Image (cartoon, rainbow, N blue to C red):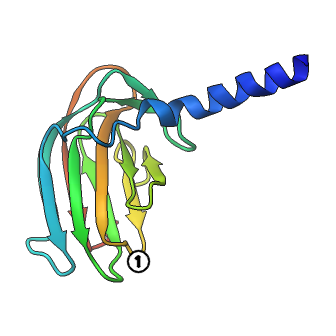
Amino acid sequence: MTMRLLLAALALVLAAPLVQAQSVGEAPTYGTVSLRAGFTPDPHEMSITAGGSISVGISGCTGKVSDAPDIDLTWRGGSSTLYIYSMSDEDTTLLVNLPNGSWACDDDSLGDRNPLIIVRNAPSGLYNIWSGTYGSGLASTDVMISEIDPR
């Protein structure tokens, strides 16, 4: 009986970060972007404020995000690879809910403080994008959506 309770408690702790960040139905704070394969100008850039009060603890990623997504991307793609990244003087993170309901998260793949999420053969659909901060507080950042590898 005690082992069952321990396993149930562990399952709740492990699931908590995903539950906290799943406000996918809320209106995005900085708007909706509609892009299709071959869009110009590439990259598409949006200046936003990253961060919030919700802790994210998905594999390979930590930080704080807001309740609602920052940006909703409606993508009509085909077989393009999408690069979603941000550039900031502060340490930022990215959290993306993909059209199939799975999550992608990153902290520093584009360099010292900048995240990069790569979606190969990006399926058409809605991408909910959160820009977070590694620590507490807020940070100015530019979120970029591109078909060109920024590295």
Q: Quadrant of the C terminus?
A: bottom left
Looking at the image, the residue that sits furthest to the front is 1
How far across and how far down the image is residue 49, in percent? 18, 33
Q: Judge the density around disc 1: few (<14), some (14-19), many (≥20) Cα neighbours within 10 Å.
A: few
Q: Secondary structure at mark 1?
A: loop
33 left or right of 150 in image: left
Across and down, in percent, residue 139 comes to 22, 30
> Where does label 1 land, which residue?
121
Which quadrant holds residue 29?
Answer: top left
Residue 30 visible in image: yes
Residue pictured at 91% horizontal, 19% vertical? 1
Q: Residue at x 32, y 65 (%)?
A: 83
**99 w.r.t. 68: above or below:** below
Amino acid on which disc 1 is placed: Asn
In this picture, residue 119 sits left or right of residue 6: left
Image mark count: 1
The image quadrant of residue 33 is bottom left
- 15 left or right of 28? right
Q: Percent x, y for residue 80?
A: 32, 79
Q: Image point 43% across, 43% down: which residue?
A: 107
Q: Work out whether 18 lies above or below 126.
A: above
Left of 91 or right of it: where is 146?
left
Nearer to me, 99 or 57 = 99
Name the foreground residue: 119 vs 9: 9
Image height of 12 relative to 33, above or below? above
Residue 109 appears at what percent x and percent y? 44, 53
